Amino acid sequence: MSVPSPIEFIQRPGDLTQAQRIFHGRGHGYPGLEHVCIDWIQPVLLVTLFAEPEAEWLQQLQSDLLALMPECESLQVQYRCRRGAPCEVLFGDELQQVTADENGLKYQISLGRAQNTGLFLDIINGRQWLRENAKDKNILNLFSYTCGFSVAAIAGGAGQVVNVDMAKGALSTGRENHRLNDHDLSRVMFQGLDIFKSWGRIKKPGPYDILISDPPSFQKGSVDIQRDYYKIISRIPQLLKPGGIAMLCLNSPDLDDEFLLGQVAEHCPDCQLVRKIETPPVFLEMQAGKGLKVYLFAYQPGSTAA
């Protein structure tokens, strides 16, 4: 069976300045293309492959994409199906560092060096919500990675953001992201900590108005979110002010919405569901619960009292 081409399902972006996914096969909405995702990060087209392609198919995809977007200066393929997720430049310049624009904010993107580029495009609506609700707030950003939420929060007028992540290199990129946007770094903290062993230090700059938790699904030796998420949720009463908001994210395809909602109901029943933040339409998911899950909860102590 031949693999179809994704080109017929791709719409040319209306605003080429904006970083965005233009094709998301991982959502199983396009039979035969479950292994293909394509992102536009000006001036780069990045194709991510989760299964080995036929050479002829990849060559045709290259031709189709360059015809659709002649502005592309570098067409790169990341082979997530291969050990180490290596990257190959199919066309143009071997760009390894570019700056992404998302709603007027700038983020440093690394290509060909690691599995992830530095910005998760599926959670754009979460960053936008935070930007719109951050004014004068004290915000805790757990598993902050390269501090995308922090950049959005400071842009929205946050009083302080505390970023916590074990990966100090990612935090350094986060600091650069703030500098790219001319932010006041005196309002931003970067803590290179093991979250599960550092609650005392994490609590110290609190209590917080908003808590963001966007954990990896699994990292050997540090995080197994199915086992560990309750450890974060049960700490919410110690971290959030009454009436504070927790944005809890879950990106495991093996754990659905009910897992997250059930964890909150069991381990912090004083958290009341506010709403779900949806992903952009391009991240179409045909199998319920497989994609990114993002929920807002309000911490209302005493709300479950008899």
Image: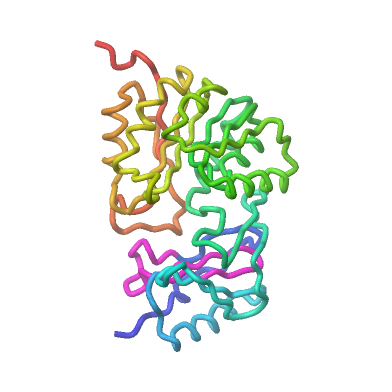
Apparent side of residue 284 relative to residue 200 in the rendered image (left or right): left
Quarter of the figure with the C terminus: top left
Report x, y in % for residue 18. Answer: 62, 57
Query: How many marks can you see?
Result: 0
Q: Which residue lies furthest to the top in this view?
A: 306
Q: Which residue is drawn at 66% across and 63% down?
A: 97
Q: Residue at x 28, y 12 (%)?
A: 305
Tell me, yes or no, if residue 187 can be seen here.
yes
> Quadrant of the rendered structure where residue 235 is?
top left
Report x, y in % for residue 269. Answer: 30, 23
Q: Residue furthest right?
A: 182
Residue 295, compared with residue 202, is above or below; it is below
Report x, y in % for residue 200. Answer: 48, 24
Quarter of the figure with the N terminus: bottom left
Q: Which residue lies furthest to the left in this view?
A: 306
Quick check: is 26 in the magenta stretch? yes
Residue 302, compared with residue 51, is above or below; it is above
Span colored in magenta: 24-49
Apparent side of residue 87 relative to residue 297 in the rendered image (left or right): right
Tell me, yes or no, if residue 293 can be seen here.
no
Q: Which residue is drawn at 66% across and 69% down?
A: 95
Report x, y in % for residue 213. Answer: 45, 37
Q: Which residue is drawn at 47% across and 76% down?
A: 7
Q: Which of 280 and 153 is in front in this view?
A: 153
Apparent side of residue 64 relative to residue 222 in the rendered image (left or right): right
Q: Which of 211 and 115 is in front in this view?
A: 115
